């Protein structure tokens, strides 16, 4: 028998949602300050209106649903799943008011893409967007990379049930014993790298001839999106706009750092640098990057698109690693994936996007940890078949510490991997039903689900509304890695059918 949720359950969920909505409003202070700095008063008004809406709903939820009850697992997962839908909604308000979107659905798509660190975009006339709105586009990507719930845990929420919300954002690994301290460490790492990365990219921008103001803001925005493995840029030509090898080298480094598990960052920061060469995730990620790039390079060489080895490496490696770690930065035009990269190169890129980066990072996709565990389990089974039946085969893997491979590890990894594969297929099927080719549909579906942001040209403001909704759903569920969304669906069903 399915039990109907109690009113007290709804109160707990809405109370913490109110705090997260309030946090979204406070975050809008940054683009307000940016607008005041540059005299963009229309943009400032857009964000003031959005802030007032956030404060109205946030304080109302906190006041109307005030509770002192502790979050349970179901409550925390529910808060995590719903908070992302609401964050995208409130984040879309100033974007829509900017006048650079054809509809609120397009602005919501952009907002969800930002929070989910995807990078697919429907914005119009990007090259003429205000500094304030560009700041917001990239800042929501920075927030989403760390986690909507993580920012709330850092500043607004202190509760014994905080870990349930943290886990609902697809982060079930505590770096420090206290989840609040874990959230603050994630922000500390991100802000330190933000300062260093912005300085380096600013220097490159000035060297390439950008004015100082443009160089420093572009550097900040590009770092935010690269570190959080998103794909937004302040220019419509993406990274191709800059034609800078120096910028490409730095962004590759930042993208790779962003794709690493925050536990790995903690290990390195505390002096355990050997973890980088022992960890199953890093080893698996290195192998899959080399494999997918090799396939791509062979395909590009056969096609003869890039006559020089340097240009082949520069174009091929950049797209592959950008796709693999889920960033979505590109140094080629979107339609070149179909017109020039068709065949082995685009298949290699799709595989790279589907695999993704590390668990408990800002990257999307199936994740290197799960791929590594699946292959370790396969190796274990092969050993069992080759050795005598009375021999006990124990397989270990190293992830911060040595762990004995058990059925629960394989079951969890295989289940999430299967969910991703099914969602890749569903999105591709939706694209084909709406008239796009199988290859295009699969490319765009994997990019949306794995929160990558590379596009072969399907994603634009004039694509069918049904496809926009499909990609929004894929970005949302892909970023949260299914579990908290499944709990949300179960909650809705219990409200309808429960007794």
Image (tube, rainbow, N blue to C red):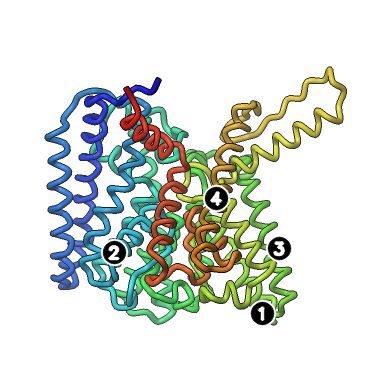
Residue at 41%, 49% (x, y): give it.
476
The residue nearer to you, when weighing 178 against 421, is 421
Indicate the position of residue 465 as horizontal and vertical percent values: 38, 63
Mark 4 or 2, nearer chain start:
2
Residue underneath mark 2: 135
Q: Count the numbered circles shown.
A: 4
Residue at 17%, 64% (x, y): give it.
46
Q: CA distance from mark 4 to mark 2?
A: 26 Å
Compared with 78, 52 (above or below) is below
Quarter that holds the N terminus: top left
Residue underneath mark 4: 357
Residue underneath mark 3: 294
Q: CA distance from mark 3 to mark 4?
A: 18 Å
Quarter that holds the C terminus: top left
Badge 1: few (under 14), some or many (20 or more) residues near its Cα, within 10 Å?
Answer: some
Horizontally, residue 339 falls left or right of residue 129, namely right
Mark 2 or 1, nearer chain start:
2
Q: CA distance from mark 3 to mark 1?
A: 15 Å
Mark 4 or 1, nearer chain start:
1
Mark 3 or 4, nearer chain start:
3
Horizontally, residue 371 falls left or right of residue 72, namely right
Mark 3 or 1, nearer chain start:
3
Name the outermost residue toward the top. Answer: 390
Horizontally, residue 30 falls left or right of residue 168, namely left
Indicate the position of residue 9 as horizontal and vertical percent values: 26, 27
Q: Quadrant of residue 438?
A: bottom right
Residue underneath mark 1: 306
């Amino acid at each position: 028998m399915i039990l109907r949720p109690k009113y007290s359950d709804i109160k707990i969920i809405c109370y913490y949602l109110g705090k997260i909505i309030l946090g979204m409003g406070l975050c809008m202070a940054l683009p307000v300050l940016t607008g005041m700095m540059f005299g963009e008063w229309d943009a400032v008004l857009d964000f003031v209106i959005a802030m007032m809406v956030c404060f109205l709903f946030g304080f109302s939820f906190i006041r109307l649903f005030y509770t002192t009850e502790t979050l349970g697992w179901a409550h925390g997962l529910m808060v995590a799943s719903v908070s992302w839908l609401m964050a995208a909604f409130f984040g879309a308000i100033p974007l829509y008011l900017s006048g650079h979107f054809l509809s609120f659905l397009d602005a919501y798509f952009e907002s969800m893409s930002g929070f989910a660190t995807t990078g697919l975009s429907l914005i119009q006339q990007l090259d003429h967007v205000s500094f304030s709105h560009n700041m917001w586009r990239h800042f929501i990507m920075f927030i989403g990379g760390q986690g909507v719930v993580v920012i709330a845990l850092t500043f607004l929420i202190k509760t014994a049930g905080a870990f349930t919300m943290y886990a609902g954002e697809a982060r079930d690994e505590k770096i420090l014993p206290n989840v609040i301290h874990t959230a603050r460490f994630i922000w500390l790492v991100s802000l330190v790298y933000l300062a260093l990365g912005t300085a380096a990219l600013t220097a490159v921008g000035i060297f390439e001839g950008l004015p100082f103001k443009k160089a420093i803001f572009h550097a900040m925005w590009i770092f935010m999106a690269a570190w959080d493995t998103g794909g937004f840029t302040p220019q419509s030509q993406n990274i191709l706009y800059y034609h800078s090898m120096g910028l490409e080298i730095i962004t590759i480094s930042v993208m790779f750092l962003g794709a690493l598990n925050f536990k790995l960052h903690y290990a390195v920061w505390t002096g355990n640098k050997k973890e980088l060469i022992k960890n199953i995730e890093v080893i698996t990620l290195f192998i899959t990057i080399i494999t997918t790039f090799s396939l791509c390079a062979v395909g590009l060489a056969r096609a003869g698109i890039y006559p020089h080895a340097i240009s082949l490496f520069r174009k091929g490696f950049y797209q592959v690693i950008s796709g693999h770690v889920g960033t979505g930065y590109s140094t080629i035009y979107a339609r070149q994936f179909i017109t020039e990269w068709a065949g082995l190169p685009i298949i290699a890129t799709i595989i790279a996007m589907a695999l993704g980066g590390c668990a408990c990072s800002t990257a999307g996709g199936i994740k290197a940890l799960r791929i590594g565990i699946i292959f370790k389990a396969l190796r274990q089974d092969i050993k069992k078949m080759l050795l005598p039946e009375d021999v006990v085969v124990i397989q270990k893997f190293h992830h911060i510490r040595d762990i004995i491979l058990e059925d629960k590890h394989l079951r969890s990894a295989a289940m999430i991997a299967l969910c991703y594969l099914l969602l890749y297929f569903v999105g591709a099927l939706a694209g084909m039903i709406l008239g796009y080719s199988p290859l295009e549909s699969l490319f765009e579906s994997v990019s949306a689900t794995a929160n990558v942001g590379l596009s072969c040209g399907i994603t634009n403001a004039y694509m069918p509304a049904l496809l926009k909704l499909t990609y929004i759903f894929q970005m949302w569920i892909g970023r949260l890695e299914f579990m908290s969304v499944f709990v949300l669906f179960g909650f809705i069903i219990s409200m309808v059918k429960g007794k």
